[in-house]
Structure formats: C-alpha cells, structure tokens
Image (cartoon, rainbow, N blue to C red):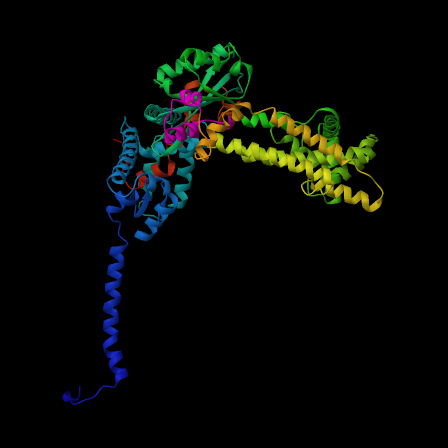
C-alpha cells in the first residue's frame, strides 16, 4: 500500500499473505478430517457397523475397517453385503435388522461376562483355557503354560519397574488342570445353549450323521446340524454321542433321540439327513433314517454322502485296470514294507537326483490315496525298474507297452477324480454346488471319451507323453486308445448309476437357481411344506450333501483323544470337540473384550 510509505511486489504479497492463510486452511482441513474420521452413530443403522477399540467393525461378518471413513464403510457394506442391503432397504426395515444384529452381539458379550463372574475366576484363565483346548492340548498343560510364562517374564520384564506386579498376576492366574476343565465345560455349555436356541428359532434344520471308533475302541456318533440363524447359515457340531454297546440302527436312533429330548430340539423342523450310506443308517426297516421317519410320522429327505459315492466310482479296479493297480501295490509293498529295501531305494533316489524321497503306501479308505500313489509311482518308475533288477525281481509288465498305456491312463484319470473330490470337500458346501460339480464332471467324462477316440489326448498328459516317446522310437507302433475310451465310458456309466437322491430332486434344486425355467409338483411342495421361493431357498441351503463335517470332526477327535489321553471322559471330550468345531466363540473377540476391560481382568 503506497499510502503507508512503502510498496510490496506482487510476488512478496503472495508469500506474505498466503503462508498464514495456507496454515489456517490446513488446520481447518485437518480438523474437518478428524471429525470426518470419527465414528458416526448413524453408521450402525445405515451400514450395520459399530465402533470397537478405535476401529469400525461390521456386525454381519465381524471384519474391521481400519480407516474410519464413511466411504470405506459404505463400500464394504455395498460390496460384501449386497444381499442384506436388498433384503432390508434403507429405512425402518434396515434399522430394525441392524438393531437385532447389535442385540445379538451384545448378548454374546454378556455371556462372556457371566462366565468370568462365576466364582473366583479370572478372565485371563478363560483365554488360556480356550487356547489350550483349541490346540488339542491336555488340561494339565495349563500349569506348564503358567510355568513357561513365569520363566519368560523373569527375563523379558527384568528392566521394568513393575516386574514384580506382572509376576504376581501370572502367579495368581488360575490354570490348574481342574480349572481348565471347568472353564472348558462352562464355555461348551454356553455354546450348546446358543446352538439350541438358534435351532429353535430357525425355520428348518438338517443333520449330517456318521459313526466312527476312537482310540479306546468306543464308538462315537457325530451329529452336525445346519440351520439359518438370521442371515447366517450355521454349521455346528451338536454332539459326539458315545455308543458303548452295538452300533445297530436302533442303538444310534435311541442315543440320538435321548439327546434330542434332553436338549429340546424341535424335531418337527428337521428337514433332511445325510449319512455315509451304511446299512445301520439307511436300512429299509431298522436303519436310522427309517426309524426316524417312523417316529416322526412324516417324510424326511435322506442323502447318501456324495463324497463317498464319488470315492466308490473312483476305485476303477474292475478287470484289466484292477490288475494294473494290483501290480503297483505289490511292488510298492515289496519296497516300502521292508525296512532294508526302503532305505536302499531312498538312497538310490538321492543318488540319481529324483525330486521325491520315497514311495507312498496305498490306503483304500483314503479318498485321494489312489491318485497320489499312482502319480508318485509314475515319477519314480525308472528307479523302480532299476531297483527291482538289482534285487533280481522280475516284473516284465513294467516294460510292456500295453500295460504302461493302461497305467498312465490310470494316473491321468485318478488325477481328474482327485480334483473333483477336493473340489467337493470343505465346510459349507450346499447340495446345489455338490450336485453341480458331479454333473459337470459327467459332462467332462463325455469330453474325455471324444478326446481318446480322436487320439488328441488333450486331457491325458501322461498318456500323451508316453505315446509320443514310443512313437519317436518306433513310428509304426499302434496304440489301442479305443480301449481307454471304453474304460472311460464304464466310469461314466458308474457315475450315472449313482447319486440317485440328487437326481431325484433336480427339479427342486433348479427351482432355486432358475425359478423361471421350471415348476414344482404338488408332491415336492407337500414334502417340504413350502409355499414361497424364499422358504424353499432356505430349506435347500440347509441340506447337507456330504458328511465331510463329520469326517472333519473325527480328525479333531483323533487329535484330542489320542493314545496319551485315551481315558478322557465323555463330558470332557464333548466339550473339547464343541470348542474346537464351533464358530460361535471367537477367540480374538474374547481377547478384545479382555483388553478393553469389558470383561473383568481380576478375580471377583
């Protein structure tokens, strides 16, 4: 301003005035951003989110959004929970649904608080007990864990002024074998009450059942339930029932009904049962399913585990292919079952630089064993011939073109079958996805037949490599690929002859995925007691197509009740199994409650 006696250039003016203005703008923007990144209460009703420990947590899937911005929360809700958004449009219906989710979470937290207030208990001991059980460790490991923590704390916190206080808290934490056992039973009881409550509130539920024998030769009956809890499809282990006598259908049925009456299960809502197809389960007059239908005086759908049926089809051991597999098993047993031969063969593999360090023994009851054994045998075939020659054992078939052609065909085909089996494994697979996988594989088998008949071998890598190697050394060599096509055709017919329950309800399943292309007959409607598409969908989604969940429970059973814990009581075993298999009790959630002091951290 020239009136003040001096002048300022335009550039100086910009610098002089812009610096404070920019600072003020930045401070205002930071203040606005801080406000913008603060959790807003309306997000709970709009997007089903709550604030926990400085993060936005989804009530539907329990995922956390670290950056607390509306756009991030909205993006998560729109992309991950589009079904929930369409079912509950913005407004009163969504507010009500979100409030129900919030109430359910608060009820779970209240249960955890109740656990820690019963007697002179410590919340840390609940976390420790849960970790011990879920890692398959014995209850007595609580004292070992406590000793371990004390030894580590003495060194780790040596330079801290409150070291004595830390040591004292660890020493006061109850983790005796009895304490770990009691807390395990308490948590398992709470989980069971929640399961029964949700099943009673669900419109339908289905069961997967299987029976196996534990290390103490006691029969264990695994009962897995699938049901809809709100918008979540739950798959929970209800119980592992000990069968101390015979395991006839009547014995299994009696044990299950006693459990159902004791827990007040709504048997009128039972829709379907999936079993392994054993006579005690599906016997016409005295099988479990027949007795259950008779007791309930109504039709109940029954499914033979699709994985077991696929495994039966995959055996492919009839006729000539059976002879091939038999020779492979004999050779493997000669090498692996004898300690000296096994050591010498492994030494040979190391000397020639083979990627593998030995052969695999065949187990007929393991679904993937056949394919893995054949694949490893093919990878070590040259070394096997050399080793047998060194031992003076003659198996001329291992060098015959016809036998090798069948062998490599078996390697390729069992690989395809293993891929199908793995695809159908896993928790949560519905009858729709399992049926689709099997039917798609049947179409693939038809393609395989054409591939063999034309000689292109696009889907048979080992056969193609063997054929190319033979043709290179002997161009006039002929290969009987039509015989291989005949084997594939027989496999296709084996598939067509099975999976009857899934084919019987094809129209019903298609009604779920393509309701505009088909209609249900009156029998289906009467059988399922369903009048709307929504209820049909819920009913079908609860159905089990396989007993994979039962097989998984038996794996946990083997880990928990081992040779070293063979005297574990039925109550303790059932509690350990429930905490290992349930999805209700979230360990991270419990730790968060303890750290945020929502659960008391000291004894009451």
Residue 170: x and y, percent?
A: 35, 36
Dividing the image into 4 quarters, which one contains the C terminus?
top left
| Location of residue 579 (image quadrant) | top left
Residue 556 appears left or right of 366: left
User: In this image, 362 relative to 226: left or right?
Assistant: right
Q: Which residues are magenta?
A: 521-548
Relative depth, front residue between 60 and 105: 60
Q: Is residue 72 above or below residue 365?
A: below
- Name the residue furthest left: 3
Residue 164: in magenta span: no
- The structure residue drawn at horizontal position 73% and vertical position 40%, both measured from the top left corner, is 454
Residue 528 lies within the magenta run: yes
How far across and down, in percent of the image, does residue 126 sit?
35, 32
Q: Is residue 225 left or right of residue 461?
A: left
Quadrant where the image shows the N terminus: bottom left
Q: Main secondary structure of the magenta part?
A: helix
Q: Please state which of residues 77 and 253 is positioned toward the viewer in this rendering.
A: 77
Residue 396 quadrant? top right
For residue 12, side relative to residue 513 (left or right): left
């Amino acid at each position: 301003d020239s009136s003040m006696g001096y002048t300022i250039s335009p550039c100086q003016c910009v610098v002089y005035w812009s610096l404070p203005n920019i600072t003020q703008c930045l401070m205002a923007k930071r203040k606005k951003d801080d406000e913008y990144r603060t959790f807003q209460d309306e997000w709970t009703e709009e997007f089903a989110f709550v604030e926990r420990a400085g993060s936005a947590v989804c009530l539907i899937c329990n995922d956390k959004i670290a950056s607390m911005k509306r756009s991030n929360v909205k993006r998560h809700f729109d992309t991950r929970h589009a079904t929930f958004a369409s079912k509950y449009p913005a407004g009163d219906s969504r507010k009500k649904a979100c409030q129900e989710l919030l109430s359910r979470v608060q009820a779970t937290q209240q249960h955890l608080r109740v656990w820690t207030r019963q007697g002179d208990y410590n919340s840390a001991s609940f976390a420790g007990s849960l970790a011990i059980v879920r890692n398959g460790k014995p209850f007595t490991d609580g004292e070992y864990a406590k000793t371990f923590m004390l030894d580590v704390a003495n060194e780790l916190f040596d330079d801290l002024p409150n070291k004595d206080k830390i040591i004292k808290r660890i020493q006061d934490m109850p983790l005796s074998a009895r304490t770990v056992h009691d807390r395990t039973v308490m948590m398992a009881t709470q989980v069971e009450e929640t399961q029964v409550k949700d099943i009673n509130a669900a419109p339908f539920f289905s069961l997967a059942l299987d029976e196996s024998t534990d290390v103490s030769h006691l029969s264990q009956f695994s009962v897995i339930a699938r049901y809809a809890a709100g918008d979540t499809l739950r798959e929970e282990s209800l119980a592992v029932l000990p069968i101390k006598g015979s395991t006839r259908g009547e014995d299994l049925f009696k044990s299950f009904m006693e459990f159902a009456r004791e827990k007040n299960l709504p048997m009128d809502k039972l829709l379907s049962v999936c079993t392994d197809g054993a006579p005690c389960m599906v016997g016409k007059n005295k099988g479990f399913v027949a007795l259950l239908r008779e007791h309930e005086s109504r039709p109940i759908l029954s499914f033979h585990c699709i994985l077991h049926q696929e495994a039966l089809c995959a055996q492919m051991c009839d006729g000539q292919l059976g002879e091939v597999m038999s020779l492979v098993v004999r050779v493997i047993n000669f090498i692996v079952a004898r300690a000296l031969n096994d050591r010498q063969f492994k030494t040979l593999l190391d000397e020639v630089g083979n990627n593998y360090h030995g052969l695999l023994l065949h187990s007929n009851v393991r679904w993937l064993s056949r394919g893995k054994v054949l694949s490893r045998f093919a990878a070590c075939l040259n070394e096997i011939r050399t080793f047998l020659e060194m031992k003076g054992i003659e198996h001329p078939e291992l060098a015959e073109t016809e036998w090798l052609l069948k062998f490599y065909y078996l390697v390729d085909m069992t690989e395809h079958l293993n891929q199908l089996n793995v695809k159908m494994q896993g928790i949560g697979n519905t009858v729709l996805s399992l049926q689709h996988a099997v039917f798609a594989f049947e179409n693939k088998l038809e393609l395989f037949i054409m591939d063999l008949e034309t000689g292109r071998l696009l889907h048979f890598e080992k056969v193609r490599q063997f054929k190319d190697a033979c043709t290179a050394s002997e161009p006039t060599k002929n290969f009987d690929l039509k015989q291989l096509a005949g084997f594939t055709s027989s496999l296709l017919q084996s598939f067509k002859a099975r999976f009857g329950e899934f084919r019987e309800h094809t129209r019903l399943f298609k009604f779920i995925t393509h309701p505009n292309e088909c209609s249900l007959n009156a029998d289906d409607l009467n059988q399922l007691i369903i009048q709307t598409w929504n209820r049909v969908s819920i009913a079908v989604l609860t159905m089990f197509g396989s007993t994979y969940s039962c097989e998984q429970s038996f794996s946990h059973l083997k880990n928990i009740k081992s040779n070293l814990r063979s005297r574990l009581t039925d109550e303790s075993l059932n509690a350990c199994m429930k905490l290992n298999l349930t999805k209700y009790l979230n360990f991270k959630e419990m730790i968060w409650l303890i750290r945020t002091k929502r659960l008391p951290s000291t004894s009451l």
